[in-house]
């Protein structure tokens, strides 16, 4: 078992630790929640535990179906062992259903089923508020190569297909989600996390939001919604 060494980095929702194996790192999932580029801050009780559990189940599900991820092993309630990657500074959003910033931008109601999945890129830079960019920007600024961008887009769409079916079986509509990718030994891997912090999950029957929009929009029942997602996904 790799030894946990010093902290390398602290993000908004996770801390990253070095291990005695240079190829492996440990993610520690925190309860801290932020929104609107950290203008809004709070705590979601036990979120770290729930997001680690959900990310573990989802990464394992994806790996089994051919998606290459950084996931190695869940170590504890809040700790995940993963392959060390160099993060590609592009957030990849996939939308199945109109919601959030796209609904706002177009002045349309949330909930419209899109005729095809929409892939969007955002340049990862907190100081700039993660501006939206396109594929040409990604290549022109050298954030990823053409081959990497093709692999990322293909993987993001595949994740969308697989997880739409996965969540549908749990009575959950996968509205949209955000992915991050990283380089490991020359290969592009799905990295970061998949959780209600980084996706929109709506109850199929009631349409109720079961994700971080409950925190962003002060809708209440934040912890209850995350734990209901965990219950449905793990069957516990
Ligand atoms: P958006 O509609 O606000 O652009 O969000 C699209 C998806 O990306 C949604 O599932 C939430 C997720 N997301 C993040 O994971 N991090 C972010 O900083 C933002 C703005 C969105
Ligand atoms: N995590 C992001 C932040 O704090 C935003 C969000 O998820 O809405 O800025």
Image: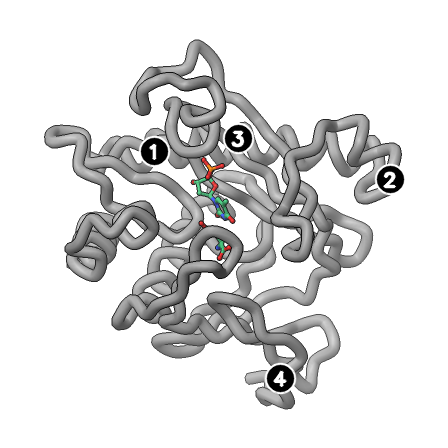
Q: Nearer the viewer, mark 2 or mark 4?
A: 2
Residue underneath mark 2: 141
Q: Quadrant of the N terminus?
A: bottom right
Marked residue nearer the N-terminal end (1 or 3): 3
Circle 2 packing at 10 Å, graded few (<14), some (14-19), many (20+), is few
Q: Does residue 32 appear to the left or right of 94 in the view shown?
A: left
Give x and y (percent) for residue 201: 30, 39
When asked about the image quadrant of residue 50, the answer is bottom left
Residue underneath mark 4: 7
Q: CA distance from mark 4 to mark 3?
A: 33 Å
Residue at the spot 30% in from the left edge and 22% down from the top edge: 111
Q: Nearer the viewer, mark 1 or mark 2?
A: 2
The residue lying toward the viewer, choosing from 134 and 220, is 220
Marked residue nearer the N-terminal end (2 or 4): 4
Marked residue nearer the N-terminal end (1 or 4): 4
Circle 4 packing at 10 Å, graded few (<14), some (14-19), many (20+), is some
Q: CA distance from mark 2 to mark 4?
A: 30 Å
Residue underneath mark 1: 174
Determine the secondary structure under disc 2.
loop
Circle 3 packing at 10 Å, graded few (<14), some (14-19), many (20+), is some
Q: Nearer the viewer, mark 1 or mark 3?
A: 1
> Contact (CB < 8 A) between labels 4 and 3?
no
Determine the secondary structure under disc 4.
strand
When asked about the image quadrant of residue 51, the answer is bottom left
Q: Does residue 235 appear to the left or right of 176 in the view shown?
A: left
Give x and y (percent) for residue 134: 71, 28
């Amino acid at each position: 078992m790799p030894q946990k060494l010093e902290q390398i980095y602290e993000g908004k929702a996770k801390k990253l630790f070095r291990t005695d194996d240079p190829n492996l790192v440990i993610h520690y999932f925190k309860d801290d929640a932020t929104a609107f580029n950290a203008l809004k801050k709070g705590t979601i009780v036990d979120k770290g535990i729930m997001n680690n559990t959900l990310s573990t189940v989802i990464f394992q599900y994806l790996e089994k179906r051919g998606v290459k991820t950084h996931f190695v092993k869940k170590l504890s309630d809040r700790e995940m062992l993963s392959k060390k990657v160099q993060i590609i500074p592009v957030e990849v959003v996939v939308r199945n259903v109109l919601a959030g910033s796209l609904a706002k931008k177009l002045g349309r109601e949330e909930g419209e089923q899109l005729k095809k999945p929409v892939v969007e890129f955002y340049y990862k830079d907190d100081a700039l508020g993660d501006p939206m960019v396109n594929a040409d920007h990604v290549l022109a600024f050298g954030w990823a190569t053409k081959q990497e961008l093709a692999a990322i887009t293909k993987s993001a769409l595949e994740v969308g297909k697989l997880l739409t079916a996965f969540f549908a079986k749990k009575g959950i509509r996968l509205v949209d989600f955000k992915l991050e990718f990283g380089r490991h030994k020359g290969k592009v891997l799905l990295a970061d996390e998949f959780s209600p912090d980084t996706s929109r999950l709506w109850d199929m029957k009631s349409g109720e939001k079961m994700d971080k929009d409950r925190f962003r929009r002060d809708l209440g029942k934040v912890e209850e919604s995350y734990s209901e997602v965990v219950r449905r996904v793990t069957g516990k």
